[in-house]
Amino acid sequence: RTMSKAQQDISKIMNSPAGFISRLKIKNKAGKIVQLSLNDEQVAVIEALELGKDLIVCKPRQIGSTTIVAVYLFWKAYTLSESITVALLSHKIDSVRHILRIFKTFYDNLPTFLRKPLKEDSASKLIFHNNATILCASASSKGGLRSFTCSYLLLSEFAFSENAEELKATAVSAI
């Protein structure tokens, strides 16, 4: 069976991080939904993630590193045919739920032709059409990610954790 031109175009977008990410929108500092525009640092982060290696970003605040890692992980989770699990981990549940809202903003503002129905949308979890899951955990919650495995982990605000070694051990055991 052959694909139509429209199906081929959508497939090309879904298979290209740059093609997919260029269609995403974010909430800017003023709270307005705007088209995502990558800076040089964010392009470098995506290039490093595409190499498939672990990535630790030591950086000043507010350069968009959490957003760009979330963008990349959203693309992966949303477009892969196999289901993956992306865990969002931070020192406090409010911090990690903020990151989940970033993922929800990406989804809510997808172009209609790319949007597929969610299987679950809650305060601590998103499950996409392909069973890929984005879920929240915090260092302050009992067990964090103990007895849990994830495909990708976004660990944010590590420096603010009350027990950094415990958080690191939890994170390493999950991936």
Image (spheres, rainbow, N blue to C red):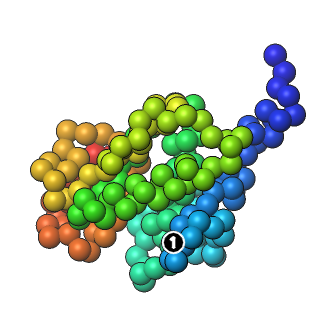
Indicate the quadrant containing the N terminus: top left, top right, bottom left or bottom right: top right
Q: Work out which residue is located at the far top of the displayed protein and give it.
A: 1
Q: Residues within 10 Å of mark 1 (few under 14, many from 20)?
A: few
Say which residue label 1 marks.
31
Q: Is residue 174 visible?
A: yes
Residue 138: quadrant of the picture: bottom left
Instruction: Return the x and y of residue 128 as percentages of the image width and height.
Output: 49, 36
Vertical placement of 64 versus 1: above or below? below
Q: Disc 1 residue type?
A: Gly
Vertical placement of 32 versus 85: above or below? below
Which residue is depicted at the point 19% across and 44% down? 146
Instruction: Return the x and y of residue 114 as percentages of the image width and height.
Output: 67, 41
**In terms of secondary structure, where does tag 1 sit?**
loop
Which residue is depicted at the point 25% across and 59% down? 93
Q: Is residue 17 visible?
A: no
Of 28 and 16, the residue lying toward us: 28
Which residue is depicted at the point 66% across and 70% down? 37
Instruction: Return the x and y of residue 19 as percentages of the image width and height.
Output: 72, 53
